[in-house]
Amino acid sequence: MSAREIQSLVKRCGDKDPDALKEFFRLYSSDIYNFPLRVFHLDEDAASDFYLYAFERLKTGQRFKSFQGKSSFRTWFYTVLRNMLIDWMRTVHEVKTVEKQKSDEDSRNLQWIETVADPETERPDDSSFMEHFHDILGQLPRDLNMVFKLVFIYYLDLEQDDWDYLKAETGAELTDIARRIAEQKNELAERSTGNQDQQDKITSLYLSILELKTKKSRLLAEMETRNVDPGEGAELDRIEHLIEKKQNQRDRLIQKRKKGHFVVRAPYRFVSDVLEIPEGSVSVMMSRIMDAFRMDPEIRKAILE
């Protein structure tokens, strides 16, 4: 399906159109089922349970309303699946906690640790931010707007006015430009696979830490009701060591992501060839774009800090 057709389908799903929902599940049921298998190596029983969990929540249509069509459908869909998987895993691993009140270093009650969302992977509805982002992008001079879209062509789709601009500025055949863009997207998709694996590992480590904290809570609850077995003390130390180790791994990955290592960009040479301008000009124009983004506090906080 084309980007426009996908956007139309998702919009109809958001309106709870039965035919649209049926078509969506026909097209993407295998992606939903395979997501926990591919990303977190869960077994087929778990994948089936997650599919039912996701199906019940997607069929209401509410989650589809966050997709505005201005970013990649793939990025949006995987974010939705990742967030639902975290929700589902929390329900699976929910346990009784110690009634005695304890606090962590941030003064949060440990009784609620297991239900705290992962701030690095669970994202709220970002449709308002994306609208704001595209408003700022639309305020850029036309040449800067086009350069930015081509650099991040893997995530962004060109609108009709973008194609008209390319035709007017370069005089090239649009079929030739479309072919070159498609080839570049394929190359970026290959690079993105490794980046996606790293992003998924951040979530996988979070879920692993969540499960270890669940085990720790169980063990602490049992230890407070009877004499402590020496082996249990050693097991508690082992769990705490694993939590610390996995947390450090996750922190390192998060730092890499914040530095932009997980984002795939088209080479400036590609942008230069498409727009028929010097490669150095592309670099200068991208610097001007970043300066414009830094002037906006909301965007600066979200993607530049």
Image (cartoon, rainbow, N blue to C red):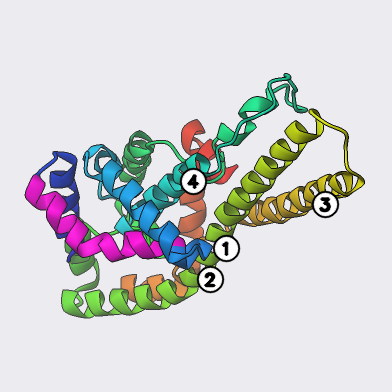
280 or 198, which lies in front? 198
Distance, label 3 to label 1, CA atoms, is 26 Å
**Mark 2 touches mark 1? (CB < 8 Å):** yes
Q: Is residue 114 left or right of residue 177?
A: right
Q: Which residue is mark 3?
A: 238
First in residue order: circle 3 vs circle 1: 1
**Mark 2 touches mark 4? (CB < 8 Å):** no
Task: Give the residue type that dot 1 points to.
Answer: Gln
Please, what secondary structure does the residue beneath circle 3 have? helix
| Quarter occupied by residue 218 | top right
Q: Which residue is mark 2?
A: 194
Where residue 198 appears, as percent x and y from the top left, is 57, 63
**Mark 1 touches mark 4? (CB < 8 Å):** no
Q: Which residue is mark 4?
A: 86
Task: Give the residue type that dot 3 points to.
Answer: Arg
Residue at 75% across / 22% down in the picture?
102
Distance, label 4 to label 3, CA atoms, is 25 Å
* 32 within the magenta span: yes
Task: Give the residue type that dot 2 points to.
Answer: Gly
